[in-house]
Image: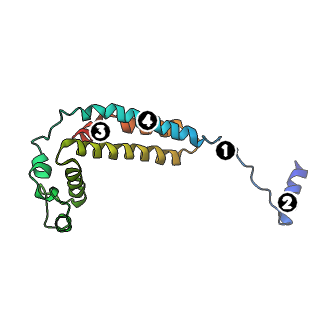
């Protein structure tokens, strides 16, 4: 023991310090497995929400008239209308949210006012958010594939999101 201590002291006095022992990192998960897992989660989420596109979906009478069916701001995507969307006095249903109105106008123009275009956008945004959950949790747990997979699957498939995706 004394020799060991004196050896440490001698090394410290000479300006040499021992490097701390490196703890072995857990083996990294291959990028291929990460991509395949993410693709499987996105496919499962897409298939789960596929009934939204059955064609029987119609606009509701809750807030769809104020935001879409009777809203003049969504009927055109010209510069004057877009400028009007971003004016602070331009409120829809007592709310100021120009980006929402811009995407609704884009959906309205893209789908000629039909519900399918709106559903495609909400599902695409939900799939994008599911992928972001997978990536962000994967950044926190680099050596784990299970944690980002469970979190993304839970986010993508949880019934709580049905309203935001389907309506």
Q: What is the image's colouring?
A: rainbow
Q: Secondary structure at mark 2?
A: helix
Contact? badges 2 and 1 (CB < 8 Å): no
- Which of pointers 2 and 3 lies earlier in the amino acid sequence? 2
Q: Is residue 85 above or below residue 163?
A: below
- Which of pointers 3 and 1 lies earlier in the amino acid sequence? 1
Q: Secondary structure at mark 1?
A: loop
* Classed neighbour count for the residue bearing mark 1: other residues with Cα under 10 Å, few (<14), some (14–19), many (≥20): few
Q: Secondary structure at mark 4?
A: helix
Query: Residue beneath label 1, please?
Result: 25
Query: Residue beneath label 2, please?
Result: 9
Contact? badges 2 and 4 (CB < 8 Å): no
Query: Residue beneath label 3, please?
Result: 161
Can the viewer see residue 57?
yes
The quadrant the C terminus occupies is top left
> Which disc is residue 41 wearing?
4
Q: CA distance from mark 3 to mark 1?
A: 37 Å
Q: Where residue 159 appears, x then y in whole percent?
A: 30, 33
Q: CA distance from mark 2 to mark 1?
A: 30 Å
Q: Where residue 8 appears, x then y in whole percent?
A: 84, 56
* Classed neighbour count for the residue bearing mark 2: other residues with Cα under 10 Å, few (<14), some (14–19), many (≥20): some
* Classed neighbour count for the residue bearing mark 3: other residues with Cα under 10 Å, few (<14), some (14–19), many (≥20): few
In the rendered image, the residue lying farthest to the right is: 3
Q: Where residue 72 appears, x then y in whole percent?
A: 11, 57
Nearer to me, 100 or 93: 100
Q: Where residue 128 appears, x then y in whole percent?
A: 38, 46
Of tags 2 and 3, which is closer to the observer?
3
* Classed neighbour count for the residue bearing mark 4: other residues with Cα under 10 Å, few (<14), some (14–19), many (≥20): many
């Amino acid at each position: 023991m004394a020799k060991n201590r004196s050896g440490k002291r001698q090394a410290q006095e000479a300006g040499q310090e021992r490097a701390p022992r490196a703890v072995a990192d857990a083996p990294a998960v291959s990028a291929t497995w990460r991509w395949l897992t993410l693709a499987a989660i996105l496919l499962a989420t897409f298939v789960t929400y596929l009934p939204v596109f059955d064609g029987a979906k119609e606009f509701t009478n809750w807030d769809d008239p104020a935001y879409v069916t009777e809203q003049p701001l969504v009927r055109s995507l010209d510069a004057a209308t877009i400028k009007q969307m971003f004016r602070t006095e331009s409120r829809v249903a007592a709310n100021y949210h120009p980006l929402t109105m811009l995407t609704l106008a884009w959906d309205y123009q893209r789908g000629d006012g039909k519900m399918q275009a709106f559903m495609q956008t909400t599902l695409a945004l939900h799939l994008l958010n599911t992928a972001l959950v997978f990536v962000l949790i994967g950044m926190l747990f680099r050596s784990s594939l299970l944690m980002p997979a469970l979190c993304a699957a839970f986010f993508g498939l949880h019934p709580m999101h049905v309203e935001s995706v389907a309506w």
